[in-house]
Image (cartoon, rainbow, N blue to C red):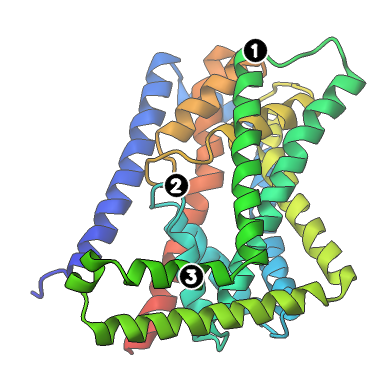
Amino acid sequence: MAKETPKRKNLWRSIFLAVGFSALAISLLLYFTHTDLKSVFSLLNLWFFLGALGLILLNWLVEALRLCSISSLLGYRLPFGKALQIVLVGSFFANITPFDTGGEPFQLYLLAKNGVGTGKSAAIIMIKGIMSALARITLGIGIPLWLLLIKRAWQLPSGLNTALNIGVMIYVVVTILMLLVSWKPGFLNRFTNWLFSRKLIQKVFSPKKLQILAEKITHGVNEFRESMHSLAQADKGTIMLIAFYSLLLWIIVLTVPAFLLWGLGVNSPLPQILAVGIVFYLASAYAPTPGSSGVAEAGFATIFFAAQLVPYPLLGVFVTLWRLLTYYTSFLVGGLVSLFSLSRKKS
């Protein structure tokens, strides 16, 4: 039997760590909340669960539509089926890498595989990231304000307010950096020239390899600059549609916990669920574990219980259902699509 390559070993290690951290966190939650899964699942309203599952499927479809719209904005017609494939592959690799960083490189690879240039692929991913960050910041500021306007008596606990403020600050900084790179893509060329002129780099790599790599980076930057120029002249209606998709994606994700709580017979109000959900996503976006496993389960349980939105006896099963839909569903489906997509080049 052939030995596994280092890359394949790393992939299996990432999968093992991601699933292991998640399973451990869920097991501890179920143990400490003394959850009887049989009795709780018998009380779960199946229609609400199916509704939450439908939201996950809708999320994938809207994400694919957004990718198609961004591609068309830069002059490339990406088929919807290919866009959905790229979304699912990116979701899988984001789920097994620290800080969710693994998805974008594979999305870039698949875009290039479908005939999109390196620079345009980078521009597509950059625009997607900027729109997502802006949508998250908008909801992170807008939902709590809306909540206070319609129901001033309810306020987030001080710890959650702190988490919200930190999360918003992080996203503002990240978004500003992304915008700067978008407006000044030539900065990457200057940084590359500076980096390749360092003696340590020149000792590790031959001048020929550095020249080839610098030429590739320059070509990619030029393509990226052209793409951003095309974006500045693009149809404003399409840009608004992409912004709408970005907001809709986050609203869908934030509504999943509401369906699960209602399915468990907990009548927590939607505005509070949305507010606490966006606080969680803002605060936990940069968890260092693969796919945020372990950290996501613990943080989600803490934040929803602290906000008094879920009774303690139901906390374990609520987090389990939420993670099953938002993580394991895309993990399994994305893994199968990734296996098919990335193995076809070998056939």
Give whichever of 122, 146 is nearer the camera. Answer: 122
Find the distance from the CA under tag 3 to the CA under tag 1: 44 Å
Instruction: Please rate how many residues cluster around mark 3, counting C-alpha atoms within 10 Å: few if below 14, some from 14 to 19, many from 20.
Output: few
Q: In the picture, residue 281 is in which quadrant?
A: top right
In primary-sequence order, the first of circles 2 and 3 is 2
Give whichever of 35, 166 is nearer the camera. Answer: 166
Q: Which residue is mark 3?
A: 190
Marking on residue 184: none
Amino acid, disc 3: Arg
Report helix, strand or loop for mark 3.
helix
Residue 44 position within the rendered picture, expressed as x and y whole percent measured from the top left: 62, 31
Q: Residue at x 71, y 41 (%)?
A: 137
Q: Residue at x 47, y 61 (%)?
A: 103
Q: Which residue is mark 2?
A: 99
Q: Which residue is mark 1?
A: 158
Is residue 82 among what the camera can see?
no
Give whichever of 152, 323 is nearer the camera. Answer: 152
Q: Residue at x 38, y 46 (%)?
A: 290
Q: Residue at x 49, y 24 (%)?
A: 316
